[in-house]
Image (cartoon, grey):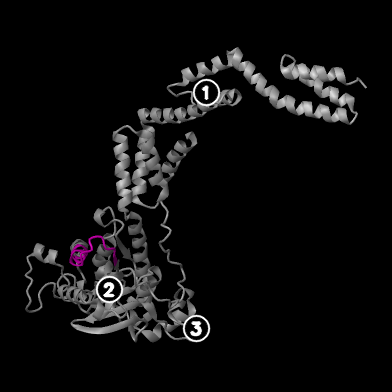
Amino acid sequence: MATTIRSLFIIAALAATSLVSPANAKDIPAELPKPDNKPPDTTKPVKVYFLSGQSNMCGMGRADSLKPLATSDAKFAYLIDDKGNWTVRNDVHYIYYVMDKREKDGQLTVFNRIGPEVGIGHVLGYYHDEVVLLIKGACGNRSLGWDFMPPTSRKRLGKASTDGGWYAGTSYDRYVKHAKSVLADLEGNLPGYKGQGYEMAGIFWWQGHKDKGMAQEMYEQLLAELIQDLRADFKAPDAPFVVATVGFSGRNLGPWKGVFDAQMAISDPKRHPKFAGNVASVDIRDMGGGGYHYGNNGATYTKVGDAMGRAMAKLLLKSEKKAADPKDVAALAEAEKMVAEKQYVQAVAALGKLASAKPDTDIAKKAAERLKALQDDPAVGQSVIDAEADAFEGRCVAAEEKKDYVLAIKLYEQYVGQFPKASRFAKVKAHLESLKSDKAIQAAIKSTQADGDCKGWMSLADNYANLGMNAKAREYLTRIVDKYGDTDWGAKARARLAQIPDR
């Protein structure tokens, strides 16, 4: 019992300071494997991702410029199969809207013109066992400061939202509407759908060229409101959000510095605490450059998508860690009730179980922190010590009641050595001394010890005598007489000695 309680405190301390990834979550390897073409799990909700932005999100990369990357860089070898053809993901479905036209609809692969969806889809297809649905709504020459202005920004800035004309937020409303229409009829929009429902698993944003010259503060506020409004529209208040930065001329940002700084700052937990752990920025400045369409280099678009997908996977890992099992929440509440009722030992055991069973969750961290607080509370510490000591004393008493005084005294001596701070320490120590000074008990102990020793020695003496080895027989008999001469065994040994000649 003592070891168990102390080990729970140790486990709690470790759980409070270190978190590990959940066993069922997937780390993304540096080199993705090629798609395995195994059917996705259709018993769990479809993982839906919404992608939006302007022309670079649309996809201005040429497929022919991607081939060299796929054949020379092992990190992107997943793009082509063993026959040199573009791989196809049967677990990722891709729907793409430009204005009101559905441009693409099918399994994810490399098309003639590509955007970040290829890299994003391959990473998330690997990450999830479920069906992945990418819904992209994007169009070139669109600004966050007008075309994509979210509802909250329009209200703040006094911009009217109307159904007629090109009003502030037209693109926002259009693509959210198209995405919702897809989700409202998954049976008609997603081949193989089996009624398993869906989860808005994340949102991607890549835009910025049209907001040239905008101050960081303005773009940053618009972007923060965009994140909040998209989450609200899709009823996914905690949906991870990944934004890729501008990087048209590499690190020479020029008039887009304010936009870039805002895109990086949005994931700074000090500036936006509510986005900590659920918003990520992907700096693309070193992924190609080459003008506002990155030289139409398919490799650049795929690198950006790969980086965005990996950033999303990291956010998903964090969100999975934070997801609390209702049973664990209830168990933590029950442990707190035990503390309130001063059932400290039970509380320590319950908290220790929570802290060690799932060390990758916030519940485990809370349990560990609570356990540490209990450990530092003198009253709780004394209660735990007494509980451990009482349990150990029970073992002592059980041995004594069985009249196994040898074991009882040994256990009491261990108690005295291990629990000097126990409330009953003085009484137990006094009881130990009384056992040691009790003549009847000491006689019983000696008799027990004599039985254990003399039975074997007498047997050896008889065996030696039968073999004619009288000296060895007398040696063992003499040992019995010397040590246990005042017992029945001593009397038996003397009688046998009289029967065995010296030689």
Between the residue at mark 1 and the residue at mark 2, the CA separation in whole angstroms equals 67 Å
Q: Position of residue 346 (x, y in %)?
A: 37, 37
Query: What type is the residue that disc 1 sits on?
Result: Val
**Residue 320: horizontal and vertical position, in percent?**
34, 58
Write the residue at 46% across / 82% down: 81
Give the amino acid at mark 2: Gly
Nearer to the camera, 421 or 405 = 405
Binning the other alpha carbons within 10 Å of mark 2 as few (below 14), some (14 to 19) or many (20 upward) gives few
Q: Earlier in the sequence, mark 1 or mark 2?
A: 2
Magenta-span inclusion, residue 229 = yes
- Label 3 sits on a secondary structure element that is loop
Q: Which mark is residue 195?
A: 2
Q: Quick one: SS at disc 2?
A: loop
Q: Where is residue 407 in the image (x, y as percent from the top left)?
A: 59, 26
Residue where numbered disc 3 is placed: 82
Is residue 471 depicted above or below 208 in this figure?
above
Q: Distance between the residues labelled 3 and 2?
A: 35 Å
Residue ID for mark 1: 416
Instruction: Indicate yes or no whether the magenta region holds residue 247.
Output: no
